[in-house]
Amino acid sequence: MMQQTLAASLAEIVGPDRVKIDNESLQLYGRDWTKAYEPAPAAIVFPGSIDEVQALVRLANKQKFAIVPSGGRTGLSGGAVATNGEVVVAFDRMNKILDFSPVDRQVVCQPGVITEQLQQFAEENGLFYPVDFASSGSSQIGGNVGTNAGGIKVIRYGLTRDWVMGMKVVTGTGELLELNHGLVKNATGYDLRHLFIGSEGTLGLIVELTMALATPPCDPTVLVLAVEEMEDAMHVLQAFRAKVDITAFEFFSEKALKHVMAEKGLPRPFETEGNFYALIEFENTSEAVMDTAMSVFEHCMEQGWVLDGTMSQNTGQAANLWRLREDISETISRFTPYKNDISVQVSKVPSFLKDVDAIVNSRYPDFEIIWFGHIGDGNVHLNILKPEDLDKTAFFQQCGDVSHSIFETVKKYGGSVSAEHGVGLLKKPYLQYSRSEGEVGFMKGIKKLFDPANIMNPGKIFD
């Protein structure tokens, strides 16, 4: 009965067809890609305007219910999971591109715009939105900003944060703030937009964004190289960065490659097997650039850093080589992997990787470990695959136990327990390994200022 009463109050704001309380909708919109938590929201509501979002937040304050923002639900930290009777605010209806300025190279869009939609819009207008990742076909721009999403081209283009030129947000009190107004230069005190980027909906709801666009890359060309040791990959990275302006430097293990080949029917890129593979992308802007790239490749072969390699000859081949890396997450998802998204300084990656690998293999020698990630920016993804005969709850418990040892190593290296997936629920118990007590205290103070009633995604990042 209470649920029906709540639904009626929500319907007064958005209309009866825009509120869902059936079990299928609650399960669908109450979760993200994590599988460690069972969703239990009270209702799903679909606002269509900023005014409706403000009204929903004011109602939440009045009736004392919590709000969980929902975008494409592709998060991997439990940041968009509603586990305790919250109202999920889904931005599927607020999915329009509102304005475009070719002079400013800026596009104004609603938070429910799909990442790929923005990428296609940019391409249609002769420009480029460079933040890209495997979930671009379903993730939403608002969620990307809420988690400061990274992706595969950070080494050249940076994080989502670097492309947000302005935003409108509704705070936990229902107040609308318009931040930065799309300005390139604005030295007028605190830039509050950067508080909301990466805040995972804990300070307020992002309701409009002004995003910058870039010049399209010229003939992106891809190299896939086999290496024996991670130290070799670091030598390759240094050699290429010294001579070639690379746009991406990714890595994945032989075990990851085998899963992708088996699941997707993709051929091995070359006969030689390595323990690891580096994927390098650069713009083939001239014959001189290609000659330089080939010269660096040959140098790496002569030094023994590279065992074998292949280079794309056209855009189709480049896309197929990217699939070897980009299809890993989807391929291993059927194994219910326990994911760790961790980062250290690039120079520390090889020794860090060895230390973490040793911890996991000594504690759980029967678990299959899959490594891949954005080695060019120090971000590696550790995936522990669940054995078929092991209960999911027991598996996550065992992995959680070993995570403390892993994150002790992260702390030793001065790294982050969450490089790009956010904290949410999954990483909350480990926040102290990357943030000091003082930092967490200031973050809690900031949240209390913007969300005094604690209705905005409560329990995420910290309690």
Image (spheres, rainbow, N blue to C red):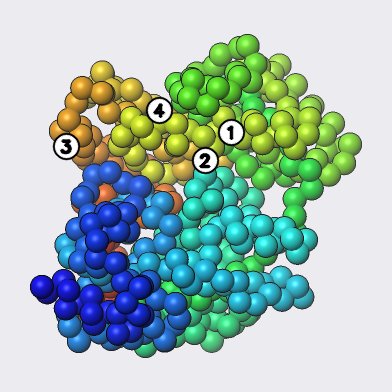
Vertical arrangement, residue 6 with respect to residue 266, above or below: below
Marks 2 and 1, the one that precedes in the sequence: 1
Residue 335 picture location, percent across and down: 33, 30
* Snapshot quadrant of residue 8: bottom left
For the point 52% across and 40% down, the residue is 374
Residue 258 visible to the viewer: yes
Query: Mark 4 or mark 3: which is in front?
Result: 3
Residue 393 is tagged as 3
Residue drawn at x 78%, y 34% as measured from the top left:
314
Q: Secondary structure at mark 2?
A: strand
The CA distance from mark 1 to mark 3 is: 31 Å
Residue farthest left in this picture: 1
Residue positioned most to the top: 271
Q: CA distance from mark 4 to mark 2?
A: 14 Å
Q: CA distance from mark 3 to mark 2?
A: 29 Å
The residue labelled by disc 4 is: 370
Q: Disc 4 or 1, which lies upstream in sequence?
A: 1
Which residue position holds label 1? Answer: 323
